[in-house]
């Protein structure tokens, strides 16, 4: 939910134009400045709000706020369609903004960018898991392409009416953060699936999951490397690399312990059956020795799994802190929207 709301906040900060009134503008400059004033107003009012979103806010409050936001966006579109007359009949800027708002509303309602439902996703088949991964990545790409389309429309509108409008034509902080979050999300979904599988004794299924995780881990390291030059602040890159490498090490450590545990369990079941059925006489002391051996190996594995989960939980908490701090440190958008145009 937090990652989705970050995108919502970004959209509001940059593009909300909720208080345009029906009027006959004297010129394009007056019309453009209304957009600029509204963007600046929303930026100032939502900057503090965005900081509360990326902190640990109760889900009930977040859901209430989420609904209020998309209802507000729907009202904005309705007001623009009813009242905005553009400049000399030119409503391309208005229409571009409405298209962006509609895309935002769509994403809010279908939750396609939700990036914290690890447990729900991990219960699916791998085909569905990877289908969802691809869908989320595509939606992120399409959404930010829509944002750039709006920026292009804004620039073209300004050029047409001989006003240079400040526009944003590179990867913004929330797009960058969304891709970093998606890397973290994919690993966590598969890791949640692995942890559930480790509670049982199906070596083939565990190996299958680890193999999928290895592929995602390598993909994640490549994608993280591609993102590393986008921002001087490298904290998210470093946090993701640390987490991916921890997962790789986790699997390398736990797999042999798990395999040994399963092998000893299967052997012990055979010995136990023989002992109970007395088909093949086994001395009590020999049986007890096998019991101790089995318990020792089982406890070694589950103790290692517990310690690993504790360390990983701490790492995940630190990752969320890094994620929050990254946004707080980079949310100013380089003061790009201090003024909407180059004209006072």
Image: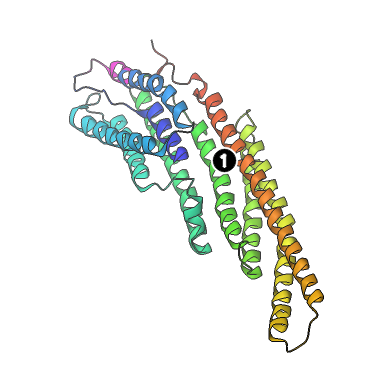
Q: Viewed as shown, does residue 172 lie left or right of 39?
A: right
Pick whichever, 2 or 29, lies toward us. Answer: 2
Q: In which quarter of the image is the C terminus?
A: top left
Q: Give the range drawn in magenta.
A: 25-33
On the image, which quarter does residue 152 sit in?
top left
Q: Which of 272 and 234 is in front in this view?
A: 272
**The image quarter in which residue 341 lies:** top left
Could you tell me how many numbered marks the image carries? 1
Q: Name the residue under label 1.
A: 180
Looking at the figure, which quarter contains the N terminus?
top left
SS of the residue at dot 1? helix
Q: Main secondary structure of the magenta part?
A: helix
Q: Which of 40 and 208 is in front in this view?
A: 208
Would residue 172 be visible to someone looking at this image?
no
In the rendered image, the residue lying farthest to the top is: 344
x, y percent for residue 180? 57, 40
Q: In which quarter of the image is residue 31?
A: top left
Name the residue rendered at 34%, 34% in the picture: 65
Q: How is the image coloured?
A: rainbow
Residue 216 against residue 239 in the figure, above or below:
below
Q: Is residue 326 left or right of residue 290?
A: left
Residue count near mark 1 (Cα–Cα under 10 Å), binned few <14, some 14–19, many ≥20: many
Residue 202: within the magenta? no
């Amino acid at each position: 939910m937090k990652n989705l709301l970050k995108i919502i906040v970004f959209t509001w900060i940059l593009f909300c134009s909720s208080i345009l009134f029906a009027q006959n503008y004297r010129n394009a400059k007056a019309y453009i400045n209304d957009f600029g004033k509204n963007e600046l107003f929303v930026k100032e009012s939502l900057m503090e709000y965005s900081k509360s979103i990326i902190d640990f806010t109760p889900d009930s409050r977040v859901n209430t706020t989420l609904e209020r936001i998309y209802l507000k966006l729907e009202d904005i579109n309705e007001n623009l369609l009813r009242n905005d007359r553009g400049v000399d009949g030119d409503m391309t800027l208005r229409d571009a903004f409405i298209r962006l708002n509609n895309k935002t509303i769509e994403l809010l309602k279908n939750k396609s960018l939700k990036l914290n439902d690890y447990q729900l996703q991990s219960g699916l088949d791998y085909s569905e898991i990877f289908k969802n991964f691809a869908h989320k990545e595509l939606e992120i790409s399409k959404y930010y392409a829509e944002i750039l389309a709006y920026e292009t429309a804004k620039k073209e509108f300004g050029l047409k009416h001989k006003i240079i409008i400040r526009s944003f034509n590179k990867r913004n902080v929330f797009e960058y953060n969304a891709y970093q979050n998606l890397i973290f999300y994919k690993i966590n979904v598969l890791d949640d699936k692995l942890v559930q599988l480790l509670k049982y004794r199906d070596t083939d299924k565990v190996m299958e999951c680890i193999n999928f995780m290895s592929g995602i881990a390598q993909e994640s390291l490549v994608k993280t490397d591609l993102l590393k030059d986008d921002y001087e602040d490298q904290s998210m890159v470093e946090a993701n690399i640390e987490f991916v490498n921890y997962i790789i090490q986790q699997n390398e450590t736990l797999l042999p312990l798990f395999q040994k545990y399963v092998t000893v369990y299967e052997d012990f079941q055979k010995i136990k059956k023989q002992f109970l059925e007395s088909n093949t006489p086994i001395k009590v002391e020999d049986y007890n020795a096998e019991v101790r051996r089995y318990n020792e190996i089982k406890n070694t594995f589950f103790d290692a799994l517990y310690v690993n989960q504790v360390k990983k939980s701490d790492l995940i908490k630190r990752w969320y802190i890094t994620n929050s701090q990254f946004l707080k440190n980079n949310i100013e958008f380089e003061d790009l929207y201090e003024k909407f145009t180059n004209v006072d």
